[in-house]
């Protein structure tokens, strides 16, 4: 075999080009090389996985996007919590500084007692349940070995997952009976704090509706006063009056808006609780129902114990008095069960007799 000079020259050029490419790539920062290697591995894995389907391809291609969203959500969680504290605190401040003096001067004693008792009860319930929802861990898989039955293996944690357990990319952990990750709590909503989350949403909605309805006439008066003074300024209209009217308008607009939005969310979660499922399970159960419907079969949620029993299990009501002590008053009782094992189809009996 003979080598011609032109072929030899071409080979030397290719070798030099490859060495220059490698040398130039080695000069790149380490984090860029790591990302490049990770992306190359993702692409190559698509050719060597016999179980590759559309979901695997989608997860692989959008993995950097998911990672970015999870990172940003984790970082902004603290900002959202501070925003909730500031907004709720501003409404409470307006209620004490502006509304309470008006109530004491204009309302009859029975109405004063009603507003003072109801308002303070709402404040206590909102504060208690929000604090517990943010500070209570949602429920994690035990680190030590346990004999609990599992239904799958988490591809991120490489650990067996019990029923109703899902992996949270933001918390980077598997959550027992995970509902969703709430940025307004900076925490996952799971088995141990699901009741606190729903109770906070419920009492926050009741508080917003209360402020919106009771402050409607004050809002109309404040809005008309500002509009009238803007068109024809009057000397008696002081800066203090202007700030009071603006505070009333701010309170009414904020509580009305939050009441509508949060009220819709609370009603949706109430429907899910009545069905015995979480937000994630609603999506999974819907897909499973469609899959079985094509085969002429009907899907039944194995964790649906009946509407009343679902609520008793969720709220931890074990006797009649608990509807008062555990639902209408602050209570830090633990939820029913350990979140690792679940009874299936106890429809004909009360799981928690009252």
Image: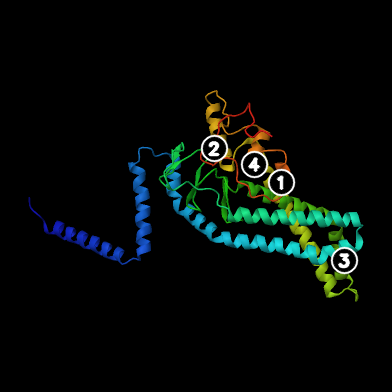
Q: Which residue is mark 3?
A: 225
Reading the image, the residue beneath label 1 is 325
Q: Position of residue 121 (x, y in %)?
A: 76, 54
Q: Is residue 256 visible?
A: no
User: What element does badge 4 sit on?
Assistant: loop
Of 58 and 88, which appears nearest the observer?
88
Percent coordinates x, y for residue 276 in the rendering: 61, 36
Kindly report the distance in space between the C-alpha atoms of the residues bearing marks 1 and 4: 11 Å
Assess disc 3: are there few (<14), some (14-19) or many (≥20) residues with their C-alpha within 10 Å of its C-alpha.
Answer: some
In the picture provided, is 235 more to the left or to the right than 98? Answer: right
Q: Please say if 200 is above or below 223.
A: above
Q: What whole-number distance in Å separates the C-alpha atoms at marks 3 and 2?
A: 53 Å
The residue lying toward the viewer, choosing from 10 and 163, is 163
- Determine whether 307 is above or below 79 in the image: above
* Distance in Å between CA atoms under marks 4 and 2: 25 Å
- Residue 320 pos. (x, y %): 72, 38
On residue 316, which mark appears? Answer: 4
Q: Which residue is mark 2?
A: 284
Which is in the foreground here, disc 1 or disc 2? 1
């Amino acid at each position: 075999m003979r080598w011609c000079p032109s072929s030899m020259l071409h080979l030397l050029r290719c070798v030099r080009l490859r060495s220059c490419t490698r040398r130039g790539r080695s000069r790149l920062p380490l984090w860029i090389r790591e990302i490049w290697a990770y992306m190359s591995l993702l692409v190559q894995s698509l050719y060597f996985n016999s179980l590759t389907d559309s979901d695997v391809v989608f997860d692989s291609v959008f993995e950097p996007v998911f990672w970015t969203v999870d990172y940003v959500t984790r970082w902004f969680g603290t900002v959202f919590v501070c925003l909730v504290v500031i907004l709720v605190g501003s409404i409470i401040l307006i209620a004490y500084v502006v509304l309470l003096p008006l109530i004491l001067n204009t309302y009859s004693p029975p109405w004063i007692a009603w507003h003072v008792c109801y308002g303070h009860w709402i404040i206590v319930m909102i504060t208690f349940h929000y604090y517990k929802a943010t500070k209570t861990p949602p429920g994690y898989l035990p680190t030590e070995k346990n004999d609990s039955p599992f239904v799958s293996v988490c591809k991120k944690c490489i650990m067996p997952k019990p029923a109703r357990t899902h992996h949270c990319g933001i918390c980077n952990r598997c959550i027992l009976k995970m509902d969703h990750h709430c940025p307004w709590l900076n925490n996952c909503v799971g088995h141990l704090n699901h009741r606190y989350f729903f109770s906070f949403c419920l009492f926050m909605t009741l508080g917003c509706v209360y402020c919106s309805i009771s402050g409607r006439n004050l809002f109309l008066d404040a809005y008309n006063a500002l509009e009238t003074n803007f068109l024809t300024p009057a000397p008696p209209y002081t800066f203090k009056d202007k700030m009071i009217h603006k505070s009333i308008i701010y309170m009414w607009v904020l509580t009305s808006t939050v009441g509508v939005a949060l009220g819709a969310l609370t009603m949706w979660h109430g429907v899910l609780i009545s069905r015995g499922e979480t937000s994630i399970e609603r999506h999974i159960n819907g897909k499973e129902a469609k899959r079985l419907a094509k085969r002429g079969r009907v899907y039944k949620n194995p964790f649906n114990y009946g509407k009343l029993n679902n609520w008793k299990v969720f709220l931890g009501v074990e006797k009649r008095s608990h509807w008062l002590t555990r639902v209408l008053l602050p209570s830090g009782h633990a939820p029913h069960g350990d979140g690792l094992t679940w009874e299936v189809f106890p429809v004909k009996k009360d799981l928690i007799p009252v």
